[in-house]
Amino acid sequence: MKLDKAELRRVSLPLVTPFRTSLGTQHVRNALVIRLVTDAGEGWAECVADDEPDYSPEYLEGAADVIRRFLLPALFAVEDLDPAGVAVALDRFRGHPMAKAAVEMAVLDAFLRAKGVSLVRYLGGVRRSVAVGVSVGITDTLDQLLDQVDKYLAAGYARIKLKIEPGWDLEPVRVVRETFGDIPLQVDANAAYAPGELRHLLGLDDFGLVLVEQPFAPDDLGAHARLAAAMDTPICLDESIHSAADAARAIRADACSIINIKPGRVGGYLEARRIHDVAQASGVPVWCGGMLETGLGRAANLALAALPGFTLPGDISATARYYSEDITVPFTLSDGHLAVPDTPGLGVLPDPDSLARLSTTAEWIAR
Ligand code: OSB
Ligand code: MG
């Protein structure tokens, strides 16, 4: 396969509910959509880098720049491009996993579409639908939190994740647990705690949580290992894991017993699968995290979550939880599950009208 040109497009999708985490509050999802034109057909992808470098060092305009300036030119130079060749061609550039993941995803889509193979089949998925959860942001009041959780449980979500931060942790968890009883419940701190707050976090052990996600700084495996040794609730890492090698190190250090896999954070779906494999070999359950994806990323995440080691519900909610209009057809919840797309490539395409309506800029980059 040979790459001819690429379109980089910014889309802007208003969120139906503002999403507040320990990192900040988001009202709109601005995303980068990539369309590759190859001699075998087109491929689509989105880059999950956000407006600001807070969750990770990457941000949307930086990702657009590195894609335009370095990643696409390196791929234009490859004579016979295939999905595994993307990481090889981009290996000399350090960092930028979300930007690399996006171009790899577009190559995967073009390649698999041309071959008539679905992403779920290519990755080795074993499920036709996957149980999914919902990530509930920090709210101004406990009543607002209970209203949101109530609505999501009524919709059928298979588990609830509460965003926490210092000052919004034990009390909201206690109230949700007391109000809704024995539901699958977990929390995510997005690295908001200092190592000295370990004893305070042990208070979460009273609530029978599925897991505590990323309480401490991404580079502090030691603090996570100390908490894991002291706590009954399993520790899950998100921001700390950038590769299969990181996953192996974290497992060996007893810093986590569960891993959140986000393809963007780890440089793509192929590295995501390697993390799945490493975790599975160690008996560590994994689940698919979310970055408020458009329908393109949602489709691909569903394919990943169909792999056998994804035994916990992911942050892959129905479209209506995020957006009133998406660039693809909406994904709808059925009995707490989303169907895994099984047509060639990602299994979805942007709707031209929605894409045009939601786009703010578009540029072509030629070889
Ligand atoms: O830590 O999981 C996270 C969104 C942006 C950045 C980080 C995170 C999240 C989410 C969103 O929790 C989950 C979703 O897409 O539904
Ligand atoms: Mg997280």
Image (spheres, helix red, strand yellow):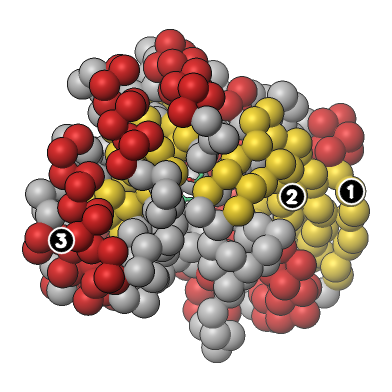
Question: As shown in the figure, which amino acid type bears the numbered disc 1?
Answer: Thr
Residue on which disc 3 sits:
228
Question: As shown in the figure, which amino acid type bears the numbered disc 2?
Answer: Asn
Q: Are marks 1 and 2 in contact (CB under 8 Å)?
A: yes
Mark 3 is surrounded, within 10 Å at the Cα level, by few (under 14), some (14 to 19) or many (20 or more) other residues, namely many
User: Image point 44% across, 16% down: which residue?
Assistant: 150
Q: Residue 203's spot in the image, x, y percent?
A: 20, 47
User: Image point 68% across, 28% down: which residue?
Assistant: 16
Q: Are marks 2 and 3 in contact (CB under 8 Å)?
A: no
Q: Tell me how far mark 2 sits from mark 3, CA to CA.
A: 36 Å
Q: Image height check: is 146 above or below 42?
A: above
Marks 2 and 3, the one that precedes in the sequence = 2
Mark 1 is surrounded, within 10 Å at the Cα level, by few (under 14), some (14 to 19) or many (20 or more) other residues, namely few
Q: Residue 61's spot in the image, x, y percent?
A: 76, 67
**Quadrant into which the N terminus falls:** bottom right
Q: Image height check: is 175 above or below 98?
A: above
Give the quarter of the image for residue 366: bottom right
Marks 1 and 2, the one that precedes in the sequence = 2
Q: Residue 153's spot in the image, x, y percent?
A: 40, 17
User: Image point 15% across, 74% down: which residue?
Assistant: 253
Dot 1 falls on a residue whose secondary structure is: strand
Q: Nearer the viewer, residue 114 or 290?
A: 290
Q: Nearer the viewer, residue 134 or 32?
A: 134
User: Image point 65% across, 37% down: which residue?
Assistant: 18
Could one spot residue 359 in this view of the protein?
A: yes
**Quadrant into which the C terminus falls:** bottom right
Label at residue 57: none
Residue on which disc 2 sits:
30
Q: Disc 1 vs disc 3: which is toward the camera? A: 3
Give the quarter of the image for residue 273: bottom left
Label at residue 360: 1
